[in-house]
Amino acid sequence: MHTGSRLWWIFPVDEASHNPNKTISFFHYDLDDYSCIRFFFYLTDVDSSSGPHVCVPGSHTNKKLAHVLSLMKRRSDREIVDYYGSENILTFGGEAGFGFAEDTFCFHKATPPKSKDRLMLQIQFAIKDYGNHNDLADPLSLQSIGDDNKRDHASV
């Protein structure tokens, strides 16, 4: 079943002020469901300077026991390279419209953009919906936003 959709903007930041603990730019895996797949589509062109997505294929079934038992799902680049090998880490760049699918129980991350923004659409499907990614909104609040927008444009 469809369990949610998101748009992910990431923007270039000054490296001196970049805190990877406050971003998705560290390797991690997600525990949304035992059977979960996400489809990602770049809505902007993505190259090495605009925060490409990175993943470790096969790490959804081949995790180090210490990684599975740990309460921390985050891992350093060094830990991932040491265990899986740099040759097993894939970086996805592509033009706007490029898409890929991923079991996000694998280790993955976004790289910090250097000079260009990145916008990505995520669509998630799972067997069970635990409400983590629901994009449900109260229709009355959406109507209110639309009414406010119409009122603002009408007064111009």
Image (cartoon, rainbow, N blue to C red):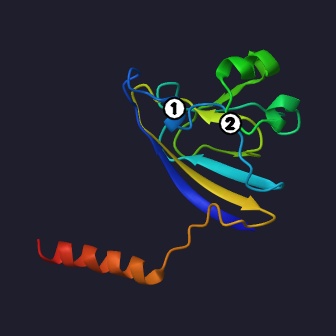
**Badge 1 or badge 2: first in the primary sequence:** 2
Name the amino acid, label 2.
Answer: His
Image coordinates for residue 62, horizontal then vertical, percent: 88, 33
Q: Of the numbered discs in the image, which one, if any, rests on residue 51?
A: 1
What residue appears at the point 77 percent right and 46 percent down from the top-left corner?
A: 103
Badge 2 crowding class, 10 Å Cα cut-off, few under 14, some 14 to 19, many 20 or more, is many
Q: Of the numbered discs in the image, which one, if any, rests on residue 28?
A: 2
Q: Of the numbered discs in the image, which one, if any, rests on residue 133?
A: none
Depth check, front residue: 24 or 37: 24
Q: Residue furthest left?
A: 156
Secondary structure type for disc 1: loop
Picture quarter with the C terminus: bottom left
Please give left or right for residue 59 compared with residue 8 in the image. right
Image coordinates for residue 33, horizontal then vertical, percent: 78, 56
Mark 1–mark 2 Cα distance, whole angstroms, equals: 16 Å
Q: Is residue 132 above or below residue 62?
A: below
Which of the two discs, 1 and 2, sits closer to the camera?
Answer: 2
Please give left or right for residue 118 compared with residue 59 in the image. left
Image coordinates for residue 15, horizontal then vertical, percent: 41, 22
Badge 1 crowding class, 10 Å Cα cut-off, few under 14, some 14 to 19, many 20 or more, is many
Q: Quadrant of residue 59?
A: top right
Q: Quadrant of residue 65?
A: top right
What residue appears at the point 66 percent right and 66 percent down from the top-left corner?
A: 131
Secondary structure type for disc 2: loop
Q: Is residue 12 above or below residue 156?
A: above
Image coordinates for residue 134, horizontal then vertical, percent: 61, 66
Name the amino acid, label 1.
Answer: Gly
What residue appears at the point 73 percent right and 67 percent down from the top-left corner?
A: 129
Please give left or right for residue 41 compared with residue 153 in the image. right
